[in-house]
Image: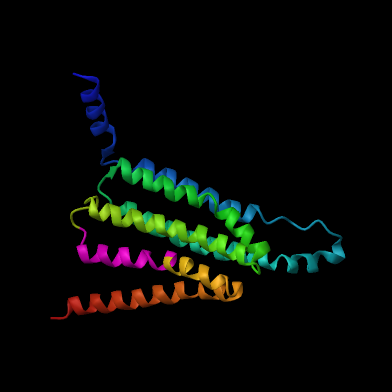
Amino acid sequence: MSIKSMNEAFAQRVNSGADVERTAFFSDAVFAIAMTLLAVDIKVPRVAGDELGRAVVEQGPEFAAYLLSFVVTAAYWLSHHRLFRLLSGYTVVLQRLNLGLLLMVGLIGYAADMMAFYSDQVLGVVIYATILGLIGVANTTLWVYAGRRGLFQDDIDPQLLAYAQRRVAVTPAVFLLSIPIAFISPTAAALSWAAIVVGNLVFRFLGRRAAAADVKP
């Protein structure tokens, strides 16, 4: 067997398979560390006792950035978890796309600090929205790629997959669309992120409506 043939045989053997557990476990660990570091970055004020109350109040933006970042990251993790529960296998491209997602997840702490200390600055909001938006883009890409490569379990309803792929695109779309708004008003850009909640509620309503229509005699 030639070296080229051996390389091709090796690639076919190891670059795809049915075991997605190691990729899922590794991804869970990265998400967990990133979300934990969000809290670690909030330091206890080193001030006199009579100034502690004021110092804690002044940390309000840090806690707000922590809460927002934790909630959004948790939503991304839930989507990622659901994806891997539905997969029947993996390819090397899927793993590389997943590593791209984790690359951005590792920057969540940086993004949160940027929002905590520079939420009134255009660049601070743009950096935050860009990082959170790119995480969502990577997550959406995973869903779309898995669908096109037929990596989902055979018993999954194609309509369910189409619904999931559209829904996961809501959050990154809102973050990325808020970037031009930030150049007009950083506060308005931050407020526009509330559209994530509205968008997901709309998708839930439409999903329940479609499900109810399917069960009608």
Asked if the stretch drawn in magenta spans residue 6, the answer is: no
- Would you place residue 35 above or below residue 12 in this image? below
Q: At 59% across and 54% down in the image, what residue appears?
A: 109
Q: Is residue 175 left or right of residue 118?
A: left
Q: At 28% across and 51% down in the image, what residue appears?
A: 87
Q: Is residue 63 left or right of residue 144?
A: right
Image location (x, y in percent) of residue 66: 60, 62
Q: Is residue 79 left or right of residue 48?
A: left
Count the marks.
0
Q: At 24% across and 76% down in the image, what residue appears?
A: 210
Which quadrant would the N terminus be assigned to in this image?
Answer: top left
Image location (x, y in percent) of residue 47: 84, 59
Image location (x, y in percent) of residue 48: 87, 60
- Would you place residue 153 above or below residue 201 in this image? above
Which quadrant would the C terminus be assigned to in this image?
Answer: bottom left
Image location (x, y in percent) of residue 120: 66, 69
How are the residues colored?
rainbow
Q: Residue furthest top?
A: 1
Magenta-highlighted stretch: main secondary structure? helix
Q: Quadrant of residue 95?
A: top left
In the image, 188 versus 12, the foreground residue is 188
Which stretch appears magenta?
A: 156-172
- Would you place residue 29 above or below residue 162 in this image? above
- Would you place residue 177 above or below residue 109 in this image? below
Q: Quadrant of residue 141?
A: bottom left
Q: At 28% across and 42% down in the image, what residue appears?
A: 91
